[in-house]
Image (tube, rainbow, N blue to C red):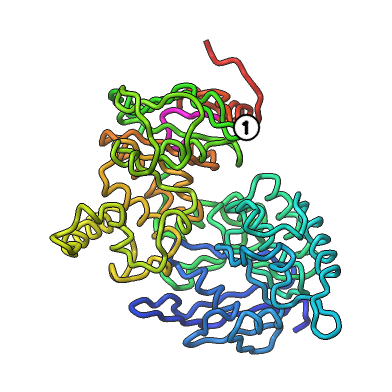
Amino acid sequence: MSDAQQPALRLQGIVKTFPGVRALDGVDFEVMPGEVHALLGENGAGKSTLMKVLAGMYQPDDGKIIIAGRPVRMTTPIEAKAEGVVLIHQELSLVPEMSAAENIYLGELPRRSFGRVDWKTLEERSNTILKRLKCSFRSEVTVANLSIANQQMVEIARALTVDARVVVFDEPTASLTDAEKVVLFDIINDLKAQGVGIVYISHRMDEIFTLSDRITVLRDGAYRGTLTTAHTNEDEVTRLMIGRSLDLSRDEAAPTFGKTMLEVRNMGCPGLYKDISFSVREGEVVGFYGLVGAGRTEIAETLFGLRKPASGEIRVDGEPVEIASPRDAIALGISLVPENRKEQGLVLQMNCRDNMTLPQVQDLTAGPFVSQGAELAIFDQYRDRLAIKTPSWKQPVGVLSGGNQQKIVIGKWLSMQPRVLIVDEPTRGIDVGSKSEIHQLLRELAGQGYAVIVISSEMPEVLRVSDRIVAMYHGRIMREFGIHEVTEDSLVQAISGIRVDEPA
């Protein structure tokens, strides 16, 4: 077989077991040189585990890894990199205190005599890569001072430092703007043209069908099939992923709204947002849609007491309130599911039960001790309600899939019985099956009388779950839409700063 016909990578019968969980059950997968091969599956299907086996982070219990026709055993990421395998992590693996340049060449810093770092060469090489990625920052900047999106670009830059055979992109666009996505897709196509095999993991079907040549699906840790992208469609892929057709319909029955639960009047915070006014009623889902940096998350943080507004008024249940801390917000019945679940929503080393009940520990005490029975009752209730997949409440949250981690965060705040639930990017990094479940949950919560605010960067999501949509641009509300009057064109115009007269 010639090099062109021989897979750049082949995984045969890969098995990986963790305590109580068979994460991979004899999985086969291959990628050809110059091919973009998408790897899909619900959260917990085994995608990230399989790629960590490939990258030398986990050792398989059984099976073979074959690179360019040669069986290999890789026990560390450094060994994998030496074989030409680079994994760009879904969760950032940078050293915040170091510069972008040091992170890009971490472990491979150019040296001068006597082992000294050649800083000039390091920065020149790094700036060349960042320029190729069209980044607006230089390599000398400390990573901790970069936005999440720019940190992701540093992670991607690492892949361009080696002569790679295979590059694995695990949810690479989760934090990127639309402009940054275009640059990333150009880079992927460049690598493809150079004969590099690309493994692309994403829950975003539009990206999968734009980039990939083939699609392999995992379900419950097992191989379910490989499809040629040009000869399949989203429905077929979804059925393979979740074992059923996905119902994306929306209940068209007219919702019943109650009284205004939350009202914001002329709220402003210099440099972040200005003259913000909106309301949300009982039984209503109000969606906030806009580009990265539009000010949506900052408004949510203000309502939860994480930021202090410079002007304006907040009313809850018709009464003006002061929210100086999350404690104040919780007391008023306001809960926030944050955008960054790992850094803001969870304690990764703690178990599922303790994460779920963390905000109400003081209310669950029996004498000097926390009532474990009360904690378990809460956990069991929301594990069942949200279909959280975990072998036990004792499982550390950090080892759960992204979708199940997000359900833990949502369950934590639902257990507080809020009247106003703010959910920031509710399905980022979540598979289509779990995404549909969360969308349905948000609609059900509204039907139960909750006032719900959903912040999303995905147009289909905000259109599906919202009763009204607030379109934002550069810290201002451009327009509000009723769900039956909004169009994709009008929504895009509004978040792009184009003012269009509202219908009479």
| Residue 265 versus residue 82 in the image, above or below | above
Taking the view exactly as shown, the residue that stands out farthest to the left is 367
Residue 481 visible in the snapshot = no
* Mark 1 Cα-neighbour bin, 10 Å: few <14, some 14–19, many ≥20: many
Above-or-below relation of 25 to 283: below
Residue under the image location 61 percent in, 89 percent down: 73
269 left or right of 392 in image = right
Residue 389, above or below 440:
below
Report how many numbered discs are placed on residues in the image: 1
Amino acid at circle 1: His
Front-most of residues 206 and 390: 390
Left or right of 11? Residue 328 is left
Quadrant housing the N terminus? bottom right
Residue 367: image location, x then y, percent? 13, 61
The magenta span reads 463-471
| Viewer-closest of 189 and 337 | 337
Residue 59 in percent (x, y) is at 52, 84
Residue on which the image places disc 1: 474
Magenta stretch encompasses residue 58: no
Task: Give x and y (percent) for residue 256.
Answer: 29, 26
Q: Is residue 470 magenta?
A: yes
Q: Nearer the viewer, residue 417 or 140?
A: 140
